[in-house]
Image (cartoon, helix red, strand yellow):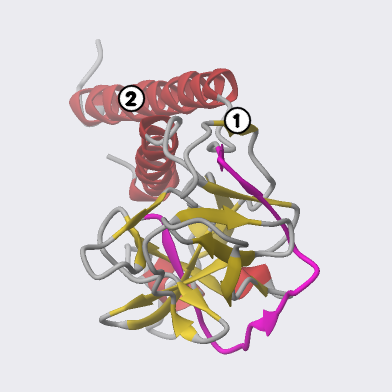
Amino acid sequence: MDAISVYPMASGQIVMEKRMEIIANNIANVSTTGFRRDTPIFASQVAPLSKANSLGGAEDPTGGKSPLPVPWFIVLDEVVTDFSQGIIRVTDDPLDIAIDGNGFFQVDTPSGVRYTRNGSFRLSTEGQIVTQNGNPVLGEGGVITLPPGLITIDEEGRISVQGNEGGAPVQVDLLALVNIEDLARMKRMGDNLFELVGANATLFPEGRVRQGALEGSNVDPITEMVAMITAMRHYEAAQKAMQAVDDMAIKNANQIGQLRP
């Protein structure tokens, strides 16, 4: 089998497998609150001449190898996260909070502060606002701890509680929304959380929040299914091309040296 011909096609199959993995993960999270879809970016890469010659080649008069056709490969260059906003739906749960526009919630995790758009929160037994996985949500005063009572959150993220005995609501804390200027530095960490690498987040007091609502995933299932079908067709085309090259090599090997009458 001709390595110069097969390697580029094999690399195409490998990146199509990776593309299908990313698409499958997007589809699996189509109903995940605040999820952000990933998009694979591919690039072509030319093998170094020394690497190409290591695949074989005829000896030239000086003892070196004559240059072979230099193969190129398709590689996964990067995975880009699409941070466009999803559709906001009303839930009427007082601890469901959606960010309308830019911004992220800050979450305190064992690995440090992480960022998310998933505003599906709950109260812990200690009265803290936490994520569904139990990580505390941060306000300007740190971990947000609320007294018993009716919780209200205004558009600026001010959290107030009206005690069970009645009276006027009392502001307890302010959601520490942040803005990330360079979203390319956001690294996905699982559990719908992101880590900010090599940059700093800035407080975003003008961010708008909506209590009793959640932001959905920004995954369009139809778009993802079309992309999945396209990736599968590219994979199959590369497979057929590899088979054709293999058949041709076998045919040439069987015919070379045969004496014809």
> Residue at the location (43% across, 75% down)?
144
Q: What element carries label 1?
A: strand
Q: In which quarter of the image is residue 28?
A: top left
Q: Where is residue 11 in the image (x, y as percent from the top left)?
A: 40, 48
Which quarter of the rendering shows the C terminus? top left
> Residue at the location (41% across, 42% down)?
22
Tell which residue pokes out farthest to the right in this image: 206
Q: How far apart are marks 2 and 1 (CA)?
A: 58 Å
Q: Which of 2 and 233 is in front in this view?
A: 233
Q: Is mark 2 on a helix, strand or loop?
A: helix
Magenta stretch, residue numbers: 192-215
Bin the neighbour count of mark 2 within 10 Å (Cα to Cα): few under 14, some 14-19, many 20 and up: some
Up the image or down, 100 lies above or below 177; here it is above
Q: Name the residue under label 1.
A: 89
Nearest to N terminus: mark 2 or mark 1: 1
Which residue type carries mark 1? Answer: Arg
Q: Where is residue 230 in the image (x, y as percent from the top left)?
A: 52, 22
In this rendering, would 72 be left or right of 52? right
> Residue at the location (25% across, 15% down)?
260
Q: Is residue 210 magenta?
A: yes
Q: Name the residue under label 2.
A: 248
Q: In which quarter of the image is residue 140?
A: bottom right
Q: Where is residue 18 in the image (x, y as percent from the top left)?
A: 37, 45
Q: Nearer the viewer, residue 57 or 51?
A: 51
Q: In which quarter of the image is residue 65?
A: bottom left
> Can residue 43 be seen from the camera position used here?
no
Up the image or down, 79 lies above or below 175; here it is above
Up the image or down, 192 lies above or below 207; here it is above
